Image (cartoon, helix red, strand yellow):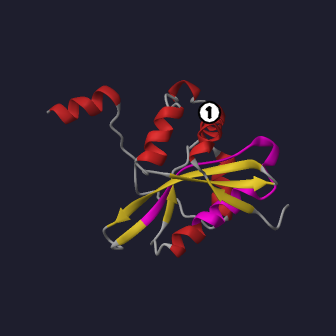
Amino acid sequence: MKNEFEYRFAERKDIPVILHFIKELAEYEKMSDEVIADEKILEEWIFDKQKAEVVFVLDGEKEAGFALFFHNFSTFLGRAGIYLEDLFVLSEYRGQGYGKALLKKLAQIAVERGCGRLEWSCLDWNQPSIDFYLSLNAVPMSNWTVYRLTGDTLRAMAEQ
């Protein structure tokens, strides 16, 4: 288990690396067929429109894991929070503290930016991740259900 970790924020030149991590995550989650993002879309939304940020945890010069996140807002707290959309560590680096290091880095970013919370979702079947999050004293939001509109349903709602 490593004690010291190095991080870096993604730059525009990292778009292929970001897409690689997204595809690896989708494969792990058995959702590869749902990935429609490509390098052009990621460049537009992450770097041009600045709607998300990416931080890498490094093994020397190599990216061992990534976290893609953005700010949300809590009306009850009256301040922004960080929503972790994706956290993924390459299989050869798992069990060595890289995932915990990424969450620690995100917690530091949240505290530095004055955010009120750090939150994320986890697939119900992903017991290794659930156990990992519980070991960090993360609290599942059992009284909440995520709802989503996408694709044709989203367009239909917009046109009503």
Question: The N terminus is located in which quarter?
Answer: bottom right
Classify mark 1: helix, strand or loop.
helix
Is residue 158 rendered to the left or right of residue 121? left
Is residue 160 rendered to the left or right of residue 42? left
Q: Residue at x 62, y 36 (%)?
A: 16
Q: Amino acid at mark 1?
A: Lys
Please check the rendered image and state whether residue 85 is part of the magenta-colored stretch, yes or no: yes
Q: Residue at x 32, y 71 (%)?
A: 76
Total numbered circles: 1
Residue 6 in the image: above or below residue 130: below
Q: Residues within 10 Å of mark 1 (few under 14, many from 20)?
A: some
Q: Residue furthest right?
A: 1
Q: Residue furthest front?
A: 13
Q: Residue at x 74, y 62 (%)?
A: 6
In front: 61, or 76? 61
Q: Residue at x 62, y 43 (%)?
A: 14
What is the x, y in percent for residue 108? Answer: 59, 71
Q: For mark 1, what is the residue?
A: 23
What is the x, y in percent for residue 83? Answer: 48, 57
What is the x, y in percent for residue 100? Answer: 70, 61
In front: 159, or 53? 53
In front: 126, or 58? 58
In front: 146, or 80? 80
Please give the range of residues in magenta.
Answer: 81-106
What is the x, y in percent for residue 85? Answer: 51, 49
Please check the rendered image and state whether residue 120 is part of the magenta-colored stretch, yes or no: no
Question: The C terminus is located in which quarter?
Answer: top left
